[in-house]
Amino acid sequence: MSSIARVQIVDCRLGNLFSVRQACLHAGLDAFVSSSFETLDEVDGIILPGVGAFGHAMQNLQELELIEPLIRVVREGKPLLGICLGMQLLFEESEEFGTNPGLGLLSGNVRRLPNQTTSSGKLRVPNVGWHRVEVSPQKSSEPIGEIIRDGAYMYFVHSYRVIPNEESDILTFTEYGQLRYCSAVQRKNIIGVQFHPERSAKGGIQFYRNWAALIQRTAENDRSIELSVGTR
């Protein structure tokens, strides 16, 4: 009988952690909030949420001694989900309030949404509201493309966007005015989303369920390998 996947929601002192945890519980995950680096090795998956400034978040992670352990476990294969600012932190640097280095788990940078003018006037920044996500053609034929429904509407609140150097890292696109930008990324065990699944109603909960099923399979495969090695 399979056990419930255990997930650590990283508390970097920014973001609505309660909403993320409640969404995880609805999706069938055993989720807890912690700023401890010592538990990162023990869980089946990690969620890095965040709302606020990029540099402030990285400073908090540094003060909590989370940067090195977080990078290590993810590079070792631990599933990681970055949400909103948490997705942006996965990249090499951001231009928000000057140049700030990120975790560097993905290649690319973070840039402010450009000023745009439509027939109705100047387009608002930050971008706040519901927008459609389009699964990248490169991902649509892969199993990972099934984690989010093509054409789903998700809730966004952001002023900055990620610009991946590797097109193969792009999971979804979203349009805002005339801009078509990357709204979700994926590489191996890393997934990042610019939108807030926990604020995206049924579609967001389904996203969490899909991610839960993904890390559950990963955890069960890892346990099978451990049992196999232990019986040799």
Image (cartoon, rainbow, N blue to C red):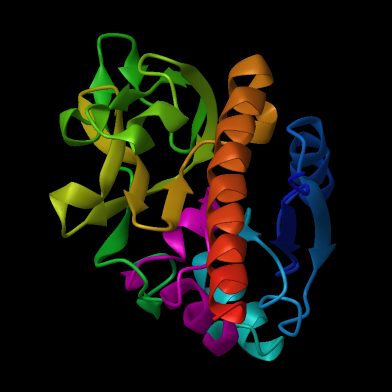
Quadrant placement of the C terminus: bottom right
Q: Residue 201: x, y in percent?
A: 68, 18
Residue 147 visible in this rendered orientation of the protein: yes
Which contiguous range is marked in magenta? 68-94
Residue 124 visible in this rendered orientation of the protein: no
Q: Residue at x 32, y 73 (%)?
A: 92
Q: Residue at x 77, y 36 (%)?
A: 28
Q: Which residue sits furthest top?
A: 119
Residue 138 located left or right of residue 158: left
Q: Residue 184: x, y in percent?
A: 38, 41
Depicted 16 relative to depicted 118: above or below:
below
Depicted 55 relative to depicted 210: above or below:
below
Q: Residue at x 34, y 31 (%)?
A: 145
Depicted 56 relative to depicted 14: above or below:
below
Quarter of image, res 139: top left
Foreground residue among 127 and 184: 184
Q: Is residue 86 magenta?
A: yes
Q: Is residue 19 magenta?
A: no
Quarter of image, res 119: top left
Depicted 61 relative to depicted 6: above or below:
below
Quadrant placement of the N terminus: top right
Foreground residue among 153 and 178: 153
Residue 200 located left or right of residue 184: right
Q: Residue 46: x, y in percent?
A: 63, 61
Q: Residue 129: x, y in percent?
A: 54, 22
